[in-house]
Image: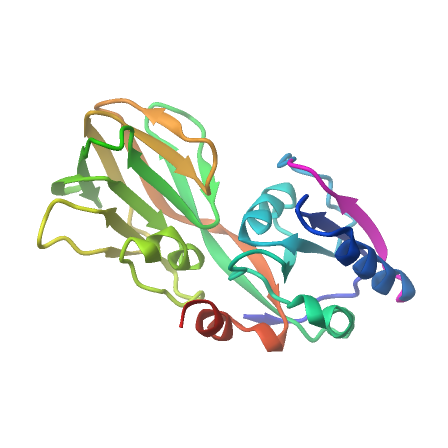
Amino acid sequence: MSSGLKAVRKVAIVINTNVSDVYSERLTKILGERGVGVELVTGPTIESQNSENLDLVFVLGGDGTMLRASRMYPGRVLLGVNLGTLGFMSGMRPEELESGVDKVLNGEIQVQEYRMLEVQVASEDTVRMAVNDAVLIKKHPHHITLVEVIVGGEELATLRCDGFVAATPLGSTAYALSAGGPIIAGDVECYVLVPIAPHSLLTRPLILGQDQVAELRVKEPGALLSVDGDVPEDIPDGELVRLGLSRQSVKIGRTDEWSWWRAVRKTFL
């Protein structure tokens, strides 16, 4: 955990298209009154943006908009204003826009770096980065799939199940939690592998260390892979999906009123 930011002179505001213009107009006005330049981004784009001159990215929306902003502005601190359904990744509530901006400018927010997940299909060169999770799931609702689990080169088990969720600590509060996984504190350097509806009485989630690589081999009848909720990719029989904790991280800012554990309590308890 690190505290505060350097001088904030220019920010971007990423806006969910379903969010009222009232919030972006108010935030822009508050920032302008304090001499901060603003770049507005709306629409569904997820393309990486030029962020060399940006000191911070405000995000108006929920966790889905935060994930989109993380791809648009890799490496930049993201400060989400919770206007979504859950908003676990958010760092500020909408009713504290003015006081929240003042804390940003006074260096009074907390910035947490959360390790991301590396995801690679063995037959492809591309390594994708997941902020929350990678989901390997069956193709057809009325089928189950057969998946071999390999950890550190050791064949651990072959399971009949609906699939697997591999999640970062940040993503442990998302689909992985719904599938029966634990909530992992954000500063723990690990990831979790959670089976989805396994046809077994003994299966439990696995928490894997930062240097441990997990591999999921699809045996039959094929599966789909989605990274951070992206459009699923077809994974044929026999294909291998490789997973591991990345050295890269996403930076999330939070005010003291909306800390990690307060977000856990407000969202889930």
Outermost residue on the left side: it is 201
With respect to residue 63, does 254 lie above or below? Answer: below
The image shows residue 227 at horizontal and vertical percentages of: 43, 39
Name the foreground residue: 49 vs 25. Answer: 25
Residue 89: image quadrant is bottom right
Residue at horizontal 37 percent and vertical 51 percent from the top: 175
With respect to residue 5, does 193 lie above or below? Answer: above
Q: Is residue 81 left or right of residue 50?
A: left
The image shows residue 188 at horizontal and vertical percentages of: 39, 65
Residue at horizontal 64 percent and vertical 42 percent from the top: 72
Residue at horizontal 69 percent and vertical 38 percent from the top: 43
The image shows residue 137 at horizontal and vertical percentages of: 30, 36
The quadrant the N terminus occupies is bottom right
Name the foreground residue: 22 vs 124. Answer: 22
- Which residues are drawn in magenta? 34-44
The image shows residue 228 at horizontal and vertical percentages of: 46, 43
Residue at horizontal 68 percent and vertical 71 percent from the top: 4
